[in-house]
Image (cartoon, grey):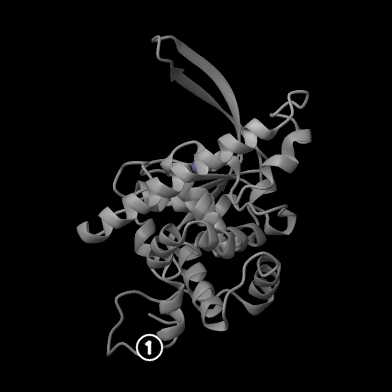
Amino acid sequence: MAGGWFRRRRDPDPIADADWQPAAATLAASISLTPAQWRRLRALATRFLAEKTFSGAQGFTVTDEVRIAIAAQACLPVLSLGLGAYRDFLEIVVYPAQFRVPRREVDEAGVVHESLEWLAGEAHDGGPVVLSWADADPAAAQGPFNVVIHEFVHKLDLLDGEADGIPPLPPGRRTAWTRALHEAHADFCAMLDTVEREIPRDIDPESEAADPWYAQLPLDPYAATDPAEFFAVSGEMFFLDPEGLRANWPDWFAQLAGLFRLDAIDESAPTEE
Ligand SMILES: [Zn+2]
């Protein structure tokens, strides 16, 4: 939109067709957007690339293909909200594959447990988003998972400094969000309990042989971990397979739809801001 006689910032050059088209085509295999939403995603991804820095870890080379694929997925949760929602961090760190981080937990008896955990992604409060390219590459996507959406939904949650599944919201909406979140999370935990009881005793619930039982669930079992993970996994599903979410938890789905506001993009004119 023409904005008067001066501009506060120079708009970055849009991502070239030759770079954007293959990235969008790969993403379109798992994400459905309207033409207006795709245009908006390209505009946001362009600005995301201008504003954020990428660094490769363990010798990984961050190519334009990697940067564009990550930017496009990262902008999905803020398609309507805009990049201001990502104002508290600048850096995206990309590992070639899953990476190990030390974990320190204190149990109920006060005993400290230290371990190393393999991760596909991690969002630091006020700091970088860390991703494994093997998991973030949409060309390698398997099943209803998207680690980039997952970690950037954590970023929305962390905007108020707390990973509690509740992003900053006006007080009126916060109450309804919190109720819908906690009801859906509790319901999912009950579903998971039921499924776990149905797994025959001779099958290790941690093994692949148990997968057919977990596949009956509308979300990955990891969503049961806590309300923050329930929000992040629900956020993935909102973009990958919204009907399952809507059918199981209409109130929770309505809260997510009110945050992500994809409908507002189709109603609004052009993609420029
Ligand atoms: Zn998570």
Asked if one can make out residue 89 in the rendered structure from this viewpoint, the answer is no
Quarter holding the N terminus is: bottom left
Give the number of callouts: 1
User: For the point 56% across and 61% down, which residue is it?
Assistant: 73
User: For the point 71% across and 40% down, which residue is it?
Assistant: 213
Q: x, y (%) of residue 172?
A: 22, 60
Q: Measured along the vertical axis of the image, is residue 31 above or below residue 52?
A: below
Is 220 placed left or right of 169 in the picture?
A: right
Q: x, y (%) of residue 145?
A: 63, 51
Q: x, y (%) of residue 111?
A: 43, 9
Q: Is the CB of mark 1 within 8 Å of ligand 1? A: no
User: For the point 50% across and 56% down, which residue is it?
Assistant: 235
Q: Secondary structure at mark 1?
A: loop
Q: In which quadrant of the rendered view does residue 65 lie?
A: bottom right
Quarter holding the C terminus is: bottom left
Q: Measured along the vertical axis of the image, is residue 172 above or below residue 38?
A: above
Q: Which residue is mark 1?
A: 1
User: For the point 67% across and 41% down, which residue is it?
Assistant: 214
Q: In which quadrant of the rendered view does residue 202 lie?
A: top right
Kind of residue at badge 1: Met
Is 246 placed left or right of 172 in the picture?
A: right
Q: x, y (%) of residue 105?
A: 45, 20
Asked if one can make out residue 159 in the rendered structure from this viewpoint, the answer is yes
Say few, some or many: other residues with alpha carbon within 10 Å of mark 1 (under 14 / 14 to 19 / 20 or more): few
Q: Residue furthest left?
A: 171
Is 167 placed left or right of 190 in the picture?
A: left
